[in-house]
Image (cartoon, grey):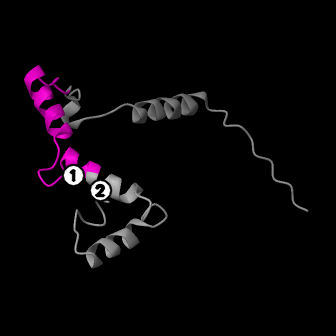
Amino acid sequence: MILISVGRVKNKSYETDKNASIARNRKTVTPQGRKPKEKNPLPAEVARLQKEKQTRLSPFALKPDEQETVLDTLHSEKYQDQAPYQVYASLLDDGEYYCSIMTM
């Protein structure tokens, strides 16, 4: 059995330099020593338009009355125990089309 003892570095300046370089590496450094740019806050009008754009519905979305028709069909006694794929196939067989399967 070989025992190896690891001693502590006696040179205090080495430890100080090592700790200082670790601290320097943690800071964000940008090219040419400049501070990082801060993001400008959006003007109120631009923020409002972005929010409106996110909440806008697709032009292809079902209208509320069409949504109600599809839900009423899916919840009817005839189709209540079937998956949307089965309901879609049955409706096509009957000659009815409300929307795609994915929309159901």
How many angstroms separate mark 2 from mark 1 (CA)? 6 Å
Residue at which label 2 appears? 70
**In percent of the image, x 22 and y 75: which residue is there?**
95
Residue 66: assigned label: 1
Q: Residue 11, relative to residue 94: is it above or below?
A: above
- Report the amino acid beneath label 2: Val
Toward the front, the furthest residue is: 77
Toward the top, the furthest residue is: 44
Answer whether labels 2 and 1 touch (C-beta < 8 Å): yes
- Specify few, some or many for label 2: CA neighbours under 10 Å numbering under 14, 14-19, or 20 or more: some
- Report the amino acid beneath label 1: Glu
Spot occupied by residue 71 in the image (x, y as percentages of width and height): 34, 53
Spot occupied by residue 98 in the image (x, y as percentages of width and height): 22, 63
93 or 50: nearer the eye? Answer: 93
The image quarter in which residue 25 lies:
top left
Q: Is residue 82 left or right of residue 41?
A: right
In the rendered image, residue 41 lying in the magenta stretch gets the answer yes
Q: Which residues are magenta?
A: 39-68
